[in-house]
Amino acid sequence: MAADEIPASTEQEVLVDQSRLQRYLGYRINRASLHIRKLFARRMATLQLKAVEYSILVLIDANRGINLRQLGDALDVSPPNLVQVIDRLSKRKLLKRVRSRQDRRIQHINLTADGSALLKQAAKAVAKLEDEIEQVFTATEQKALIRGLRDLLEL
Amino acid sequence: MAADEIPASTEQEVLVDQSRLQRYLGYRINRASLHIRKLFARRMATLQLKAVEYSILVLIDANRGINLRQLGDALDVSPPNLVQVIDRLSKRKLLKRVRSRQDRRIQHINLTADGSALLKQAAKAVAKLEDEIEQVFTATEQKALIRGLRDLLEL
DNA sequence: TATTGTTATACTCTATAACTATA
DNA sequence: TATAGTTATAGAGTATAACAATA
């Protein structure tokens, strides 16, 4: 393109001054979170796993026999909403619930072979995405960020 | 409480191993975002302003006569959904729409006196929250974070 | 009485298709 | 033909109340 030429379709959203919003760390974190959720959904499209579903599979894998209340507490999902997700994953034969013999109110949750296999695949895709996210920060920045984002939850 | 005393109700969710999730920067950002949104909602309860509504008021104030498409592009809200929010704010007499004379498809949006006044109040509350968030990081960390969260949006 | 898990339900958020009026 | 704004609607996500079974 010649130097004096004006590109055919310039999306000149340059006009809108967003500086007052972008000064907010809170705003930036929210926008980044939204973007990451979209990236996650796109990368997981073939495996048909939502973020919360992936989190649940990871937690079950790291905590065999975990129950619904523990899952809900960890992920901040209310019991009624969690039951919906667990039912969905159960119907897909990715996990199974077994009633406890010590306390028959409790259901212990474990991954099925299918669930384990899917989690393995998913973890690879997530690791790739996570790598891209991490590459935006230096190792030092990552540590500070992890600590800060944890401390934020205490506010 | 005596040293050998066991507190009455220890929520010992210590059992659940969340380390595999918490290693993900993406997970941390999402959890922080969720938490900030809840804090925001709580602080804005008296003013009855949601995050997206506050963002809109700020953008209008910084860009007098902005139109719906520009707002939607900036905030990543689709036209149908944006119209709902704008209608809501319009009914509360916080903003007003004026049809452009140059291009009668366009509506220029401006704050009313009420909208301006409410924004001023809201900005104070938001600044307080933002201060608390910023205090979690050093000035250097904040800069790195701001830059990183911006770069993330390019992924 | 309290807890685990469940059902039903409502409310909010987000996404999509189709339309109008203007250009 | 394309754009700004709108309507209607469906789907996903989230929140609340009430319940059964068990402790």
Image: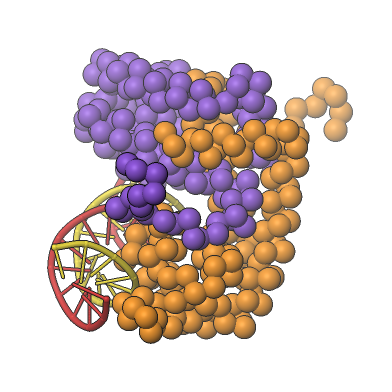
Chain colours: A purple, B orange, C red, D yellow
Give residue A51's quadrant in the image. Answer: top left
| Quarter placement of the C terminus of chain B | top left
In-front residue for pair A42/B43: A42
Q: Establish if A4 lies above or below A48.
A: below
In the image, what residue occupies the spot 45% across and 24% down?
A: A132
Above or below, D12 relative to B8: below
At 41% from the left edge and 20% from the top edge, which residue is drawn? A127
- Looking at the image, which is closer to me, C19 or C23? C23
Occupied quadrant, residue B55: bottom right
Residue D14 versus residue A128 in the image, above or below: below
**Apparent side of residue A129 relative to residue A140 in the rendered image (left or right):** left
- Vertical comparison of B82 with B35: above or below: below
Task: Give the side of residue D8 with respect to residue B80, left or right.
Answer: left
Q: Is residue B9 visible?
A: no
Q: Which residue ends up furthest to the right in the rendered image?
A: B2
Left or right: residue A39 versus residue A115 is right
Task: Name the residue located 73 percent from the left edge and 47 percent from the top edge.
Answer: B132
Position of the N terminus of chain B, as image quadrant, is top right
Residue A26 image position (x, y, % from top left): 60, 48
Q: Is B106 or A115 nearer to us in this picture?
A: B106
Instruction: Tell me residue B111's x, y (percent).
Output: 56, 77
Q: Position of residue B47 (x, y in %)?
A: 62, 71
A108 relative to A139 in the view: left or right: left
Q: Is residue A23 visible?
A: yes
A81 vs B121, nearest the viewer = B121
Percent position of residue A109, x then y: 37, 25
Q: Which quarter of the figure has residue B145?
A: top right
The structure residue drawn at horizontal position 69% and vertical position 51%, both measured from the top left corner, is B130
Count of number-bearing discs: 0
